[in-house]
Image: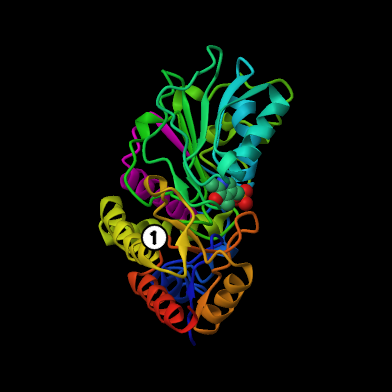
Amino acid sequence: MSRVYNFSAGPAVLPEEVLREAAAEMLDYKGTGMSVMEMSHRSGAFEDILNTAEQDLRDLMEIPENYKVLFLQGGAHLQFSMIPMNLMKNRVADYIVTGQWAKRAYEEAAIFGKANKIADSSDKTFSYIPDCSDLTISPEADYVYICENNTIYGTKFHTLPNTKGKLLVSDVSSCFLSEPVDVRKYGLIYGGVQKNIGPAGMVIVIIREDLITKDTLPGTPTYMKYKIHADHGSLYNTPNSYCIYMCGKVFQWLKAMGGLSVMKQRNEEKAAILYDYLDQSRLFRGTVRKEDRSLMNVPFVTGDKEKDEKFVQAAKAAGLVNLKGHRSVGGMRASIYNAMPKAGVEALVEFMRKYEEENR
Ligand SMILES: *Cc1c(COP(=O)(O)O)cnc(C)c1O
């Protein structure tokens, strides 16, 4: 067996310890004689898995009592419509468009009401986060929406926008659990788990209790009401049970690592190794304004498409895979999520250094 260093943006690298544990429990989960995949979601064993996962997530993020945690399906994309259907009471919402995912959410919200684009960084290929300290917030807005870490472009909100008292809704798919957060600053936080937590096929929604009401937009399907999922403890219908089990294992791994402040420190150290190298390289350069750089997704280019492609191929041959950048930015992107060990980033930088010497 040989494992590569996988820099994929998602589905992405998982902690090897977690994969080994899951493998060991594959045929017989804790004496039940079956895999978690084969188990009723109403069984005691599965209820334990679900409750433990929720409690561990609450512990890690210090989620206050008045917030609900929902394990839902449909990925991050279904939230692009569930959010307006449930929260757009006045049919007005303000969107800060810092990349493709925020843009998709904004376009989806426009189906349901007046979605205002109050800030936008498309003028420079989304390579920065606009100043959001004093935006014009619509008086009627039900919420202000951001994508906190822009997976494709490698930018991150290091300061949350000033919403002037409006609810903040945030897509944290690609920075989920990468550092401590103050949940109280948000009305709703959500993220697809396939970036920084678990396998594909699930989204976690953390929502303030008072926002969960029967009062949804007319025509909202039952399945798309937060209330139905909250009332049933994420078991209204069959959940993505195996994914919940895997996420739960990752939560335990994060706790054993020391929690989110330790992860933040590790992530800062890892990112610095790569950014420091990029900042002095004469072959490669980062594409993002320095103060807006993400700790999770690091895009970089040579400035020459052919050279980029050659590098991606050479890296792959050396066991450093999925470094091709998103088609809208080109070049390369290294996603260095929680589960990417420091040794993986060091191996990448070592390879880049040598490659630069040989190909300048
Ligand atoms: C990947 C990603 C999405 C889309 O996720 P799906 O689960 O495929 O719908 C949305 N937002 C962000 C920030 C992402 O990184």
Q: Quadrant of residue 98?
A: top right
288 to the left or right of 73? left
Q: Position of residue 129 (x, y in %)?
A: 46, 39
Q: Quadrant of residue 156?
A: top left
Q: Position of residue 151 (x, y in %)?
A: 52, 52
41 to the left or right of 274? right
Can you say whether 308 is above or below 53 in the image? Answer: below
Q: Residue furthest bottom?
A: 1
What segment carries the magenta color?
Answer: 44-69
In front of the other: 36 or 109: 109
Q: Main secondary structure of the magenta part?
A: helix
In front of the other: 325 or 26: 325
Can you say whether 100 is above or below 286 in the image? Answer: above
Residue 359 seen: yes
**Residue 65 is one of the magenta-drawn residues:** yes
Q: Residue at x 38, y 70 (%)?
A: 345
Which residue position is annotated with label 1? Answer: 338
Q: Residue at x 31, y 56 (%)?
A: 268
In front of the other: 310 or 76: 310
Q: Quadrant of residue 164?
A: top left
286 to the left or right of 240? left
- Helix, strand, or loop for circle 1? loop
**Residue 13 is one of the magenta-drawn residues:** no
Can you say whether 72 is above or below 5 in the image? Answer: above
Can you say whether 125 is above or below 207 in the image? Answer: below
How many numbered dots are placed on residues in this image? Answer: 1
Give neighbour class at mark 1: few <14, some 14-19, many 20+ (Cα, 10 Å).
Answer: many
Q: Position of residue 128 (x, y in %)?
A: 48, 43
Q: Residue at x 64, y 18 (%)?
A: 91
Amino acid type for the residue under numbered disc 1: Asn
Q: Position of residue 324 (x, y in %)?
A: 58, 67
Residue 205 seen: no
